[in-house]
């Protein structure tokens, strides 16, 4: 079995060789190629390949499945960037920022279709893999919708939050492992157990992301602490702090969280510690 | 075999019964349900069902395929309306106009995924049907990109125009017939011949649309003549008029076409007749 680093490197090689979009229309396919070449950590395709390797030698089907989940993931990033009005991704202009709204919408659409083109090349267990992929894809859209909905609400419960991050982030990680396992010849309920493992890992991954945004070492994370706090984002830490705080402090915390004060980050970090939210986050991970 | 009207009515019944999106998140699925319920002529699903009926009794697979092409078509309408900044569709506000850009993008995305959910239910010839559908879906995106590109160009050739309308409109009609035939048990090259027939019919359909926009009976079409002329759209008529006109008149025609004069519509209609573009359009249809 290969290490994460080896699989990511192998996948990048495979992807660069097998993922040439057609040359024309260039306005559609050039931004797609550029966006994919800009990289990312390739977590999902690597999980897919690892899922295969748990049950046998890497199969051709696994490479198609890995390409499909990576294409789907990048499609969602391109559309999410439009919805989030994000100017940058991986240090470069987002598709819509560089090429306009039309290109952003259409490049995402065609990248999603190319994900299905990869899936269609799978031989073994195609109907089962297609079902898992479709359900997951719809759930990712639902997670994005909930994330948008939650921006307008101040009463998001912990259960709602965990459900949202599970849909938005974890189910695609879980799906990657599961369909990878199926391409490797997994039988019985092994593949669905891997799905459950991947989903929980994905939730932990997102919570760690919440934690590091607040308390990470800036040297290691490469960004200043408190980005989520400044952006008024509902995270595990804020929701747990509100849950744990005595009633008479809840309004103060919410005022601080939605306000724009100079000391907001420092004060919120204190709140996260004092209410036990920081510890609860680590415990939950 | 059923008539068009009967199949459209049967499809509406089937679709209303089998197409309940999940209830939640309502912000995602309610606009989808509303948009689909607003109707349309159901041309693509009817072609799909007719394709089946040429080879045998209507199959369960045909209903899934018909639902898939209708869902895909509606997904493209929702996204095209964003790109075209269209406020109305079928006499009602477009999804993005009524619910915002985020809803427009996300509803389209999830509707496309639901198209694939329907495809995944197909038993017979699934891999072949998936291949045809995927290639068609990518071509529809390419056609939309070319349509956008052509808005910025004044040198679009007839060949380029026909290719664009074929991709944007015809290939999905052709695909509907072909995959319908496959669900009905078509063997040999019958299904691909139906594809070719559907593609040519689709091109004729679009050219008739161009013609009726200029010369149709307003009583019958329900709209004033010259909508395309007012919107400076490149149509068969304009491209052919420029092709046919003597060199010294081409600049005048282009000036008229891209201008904004009071008599623009009347004068352009005269040009379409005088240059033989109107007759050429009917001949080509």
Image (cartoon, coloured by chain):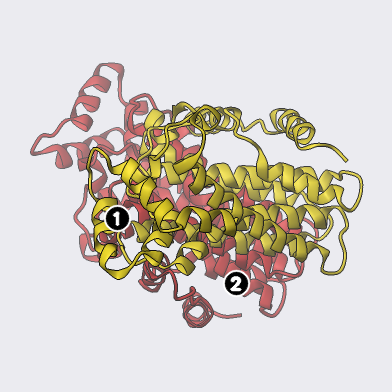
Chain colours: A red, B yellow
Q: Label 1 neighbourhood size at 10 Å, few (<14), some (14-19), many (20+)?
A: few
Percent from the top left, x then y, of residue A111?
A: 49, 61
Helix, strand, or loop for circle 1? Answer: loop
| Residue most extreme to the front | B274
Numbered disc 1: what chain?
A
* Residue A1 is at least partly visible in this image: yes
Percent from the top left, x then y, of residue B157?
A: 41, 68
Helix, strand, or loop for circle 2? Answer: helix
For the point 10% across and 34% down, the residue is A261
Which residue is denoted by mark 2 in the rendering?
A49
Which corner quadrant holds the N terminus of chain B? top right
Compared with residue A57, is residue B151 higher up or lower down, i.e. above or below? above
Which corner quadrant holds the C terminus of chain B? bottom right
Compared with residue A284, is residue B166 higher up or lower down, i.e. above or below? below
Numbered disc 2: what chain?
A
Which residue is denoted by mark 1 in the rendering?
A100
Disc 2 versus disc 1: nearer the observer = 1
């Amino acid at each position: 079995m290969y290490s994460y680093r080896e699989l990511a490197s192998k996948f990048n090689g495979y992807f660069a060789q097998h993922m040439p979009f057609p040359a024309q229309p260039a306005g559609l396919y050039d931004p797609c190629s550029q966006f994919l070449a800009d990289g990312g950590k390739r977590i999902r395709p690597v999980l897919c390949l690892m899922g295969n390797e748990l049950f046998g030698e890497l199969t051709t089907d696994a490479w198609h499945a890995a390409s499909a989940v990576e294409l789907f993931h990048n499609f969602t990033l391109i559309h999410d960037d439009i919805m989030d009005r994000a100017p940058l991704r991986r240090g470069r202009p987002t598709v819509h920022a560089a090429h306009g709204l039309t290109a952003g919408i259409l490049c995402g659409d065609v990248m999603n279709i190319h994900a299905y083109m990869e899936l269609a090349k799978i031989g073994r267990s195609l109907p089962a893999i297609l079902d898992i992929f479709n359900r997951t894809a719809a759930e990712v859209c639902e997670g994005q919708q909930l994330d948008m909905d939650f921006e307008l609400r101040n009463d998001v419960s912990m259960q709602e939050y965990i459900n949202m991050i599970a849909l938005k982030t974890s189910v695609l990680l879980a799906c990657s492992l599961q369909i990878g396992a199926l391409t490797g010849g997994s039988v019985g309920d092994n593949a669905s157990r891997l799905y459950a493992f991947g989903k929980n890992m994905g939730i932990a991954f997102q919570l760690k992301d919440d934690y590091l945004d607040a308390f990470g070492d800036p040297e290691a994370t490469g960004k200043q602490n408190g980005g989520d706090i400044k952006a008024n984002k509902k995270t595990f830490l804020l929701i747990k702090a509100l849950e744990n705080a005595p009633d008479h402090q809840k309004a103060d915390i919410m005022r601080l969280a939605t306000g724009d004060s100079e000391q907001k980050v420092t004060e919120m970090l204190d709140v996260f510690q004092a209410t036990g939210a920081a510890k609860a986050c680590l415990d939950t991970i």
